[in-house]
Image: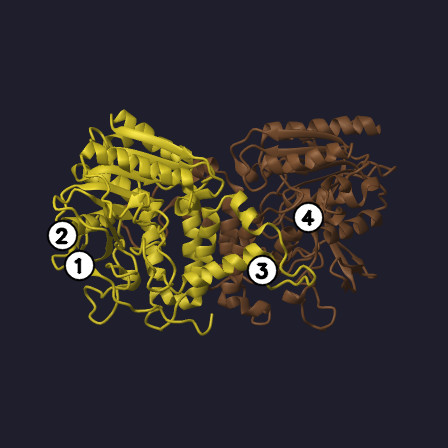
Chain colours: A yellow, B brown
Amino acid sequence: MDQLEPFAEIAHQAIVFTEGMALDCGRSLHSLTVAYRTYGRLDADRRNAILICHALTGDQYVAETHPLTGRAGWWSTLVGPGLPIDTDRFFVICANVLGGCMGSTGPRSPHDDKPGEPWGHEFPPVTIRDMVRAQKMLVEHLGIDQLFAVIGGSMGGMQVLEWAATYPEAVFAALPIATAAHHSAQNIAFNEVGRQAIFADPDWCGGEYWRAGAIPARGLAVARMVAHITYLSEAALTRKFGRRLRDATSLTLLGDKFEVESYLQYQGSAFVRRFDANSYLSITRAMDFFDIAAEHGGDLFRAFQGSRTRFCLVSFSSDWLFPTTASREVGNALIRGAANVSFVEIMSDKGHDAFLLDEPDFHRTIAGFLAGCAEHRGLAPRERA
Amino acid sequence: MDQLEPFAEIAHQAIVFTEGMALDCGRSLHSLTVAYRTYGRLDADRRNAILICHALTGDQYVAETHPLTGRAGWWSTLVGPGLPIDTDRFFVICANVLGGCMGSTGPRSPHDDKPGEPWGHEFPPVTIRDMVRAQKMLVEHLGIDQLFAVIGGSMGGMQVLEWAATYPEAVFAALPIATAAHHSAQNIAFNEVGRQAIFADPDWCGGEYWRAGAIPARGLAVARMVAHITYLSEAALTRKFGRRLRDATSLTLLGDKFEVESYLQYQGSAFVRRFDANSYLSITRAMDFFDIAAEHGGDLFRAFQGSRTRFCLVSFSSDWLFPTTASREVGNALIRGAANVSFVEIMSDKGHDAFLLDEPDFHRTIAGFLAGCAEHRGLAPRERA
């Protein structure tokens, strides 16, 4: 891919913790930066804060124009004034995950031990729990003892589960959406395809592509392509593209022929201009190692035993990456742990992607559950202008 | 991948048709070579011949040690003396597909217009119907007017359907297994990931890797990896690999960690020593363009209307690449066309791969259906030594 724009360097709102942070792997970061965005206003008693956790390729720009792509925030249909996650009522926080590439400490951050160089592929391996610990530092910095809610889909949902397991007293309500308590063998395998595609790119340069001023764009695009397929149901893929040939009259061995192919190629190439390859490796590894039961003696229910958090689990019927059975496994563990749990399977043929889309039943579920929790917590009703 | 063995040049049993062949794309091959193997003995009346059609990465070595890998034939549990496809009774033929790389005309064959060079990526695009036409020439060469049966799984099943639609009088019984009348959007998308991975490999050399003495091994391995995942059910992947960490004590960003990953890496790298990248592109394209209804005015039942062939459709319950619904679509079209059709869904949790495995119910189905057809055709019972 020639004439590829370099990865844009832009300033992100962030807090720096100079005390650093200890990681699950046993190593420590000398300094920790957490880039984040907030929407709405924190009440005087600091009880109306909602933390949103983003997914693999998401970031903190949840409800505003993205500074790199110029597109609307990834959950802008769900988060905003009068929307299900109502910023007239709630103070919404979203932080770029540890290991990310939008301002939080990650592979693009300065190396702790090599002045003038980024971490690159030497960035220490991080876990979902490490990501949550970094978010906890941000939340404490903002003076919030207990979040009203923690909400996230996919890898964001993994973080929600980890929040509830690690800091049960700090989470009043938890909404893990389209997620699982661990990555399946299939999920890991698809992630591995993506990683191998990155390693196969000559511009990968053994992980030191930044030194060569290169981007392993082709490998990263292939990784994004395979992930994207797993986000869509067969019905959604067929509806979007079907088998409309783009140029059926001239069969050739090379060249893109099916619409689905050119779309995936476009998606892949747009992606490489906003996502760092080492971050992709770092975050997919964190997802693959996620196993909340293993962190609690191998039994999932122990992770949530005695929890007073109110849970709302959401799955989508056509999601084959994080299927309903995976949410049900979490639900059963919560029930065994005597937790307060609701479980909703949304009928949708849009696949895993549905959690990012304007699905009315899903949005009603979020709004209704939050309204009930707000009443239970005694939050003031929504302010009217 | 250093020290990669070059693609082995070995002699294959083959027939050369010097008259060449016209292709669906409008071009013609000046000469056509069909490499094939046979097992058993052709009866004097030439009525006991079974043609087996191989899948994407299969070849003609169906029931004997493979000359390159040294492994047993890919259907050696199904085809042989006393086995469901009984070579004591039937004369079994299997040909390497047009576009393949095990001796039949394909991208590794001499270029028609460039002396001393192989076709490479300039090999004309071929269709499943072209593959079947080449097989028909072989079958006629062997003096067989009507095959007793045509059998194949996956892309082999596509060829079976094409045989029955194009040469209905030449097929007494047809067994399309774990297949579909067209490739789905998801199937195409996964194939496209594989192709893009090949294109992203620096050793791809724009398709002229043979000129550089190179093999785009990393891209081909990634392509094989993603395909392999689609062949397995989640249950099969989990049973084989689960989440057993290979080296859980030392988390690092690089390196293979999960067993599923190292297995897939092994599978991918073994594959590149026996499969040509341009063949992979040629054959996956043929699969992606396969749409038997489109060849018959857009209505699938017209493809088989009035057919006297006896059909036995087989699907596997956990196959998500060629699901039971795809076989049922074919079955419904056959019924609308008043064809003689049996349809069996085999309960299996092994995914698409099940058609290659020793699944007792599947093998009983094949044996039983063939026995019934043999009786109907008046074939002599199995010879006893």
- Which residue type does callout 3 highlight? Ala
Q: State whether residue B231 is above or below residue B269.
A: above
The answer to whether the residue labelled 2 contacts the one labelled 1, judged by CB atoms less than 8 Å apart, is yes
- Which residue type does callout 1 highlight? Ile
Residue at screen point 32% across, 72% down: A211
SS of the residue at dot 4? loop
- Which residue type does callout 4 highlight? Asp
SS of the residue at dot 1? strand
SS of the residue at dot 2? helix
Marked residue chain, label 3: B
- Nearer to the camera, A269 or B138: A269
Q: CA distance from mark 3 to mark 2?
A: 55 Å
The residue pinned by badge 3 equals B277
Q: CA distance from mark 3 to mark 4?
A: 24 Å
Marked residue chain, label 4: B
Provide residue B158's location: percent of width, then percent of height: 68, 44
The residue pinned by badge 4 equals B291
Residue at screen point 22% across, 39% down: A381
Question: For the residue carrying disc 3, how many other residues have a C-alpha within 10 Å: few (<14), some (14-19), or many (20+)?
Answer: many
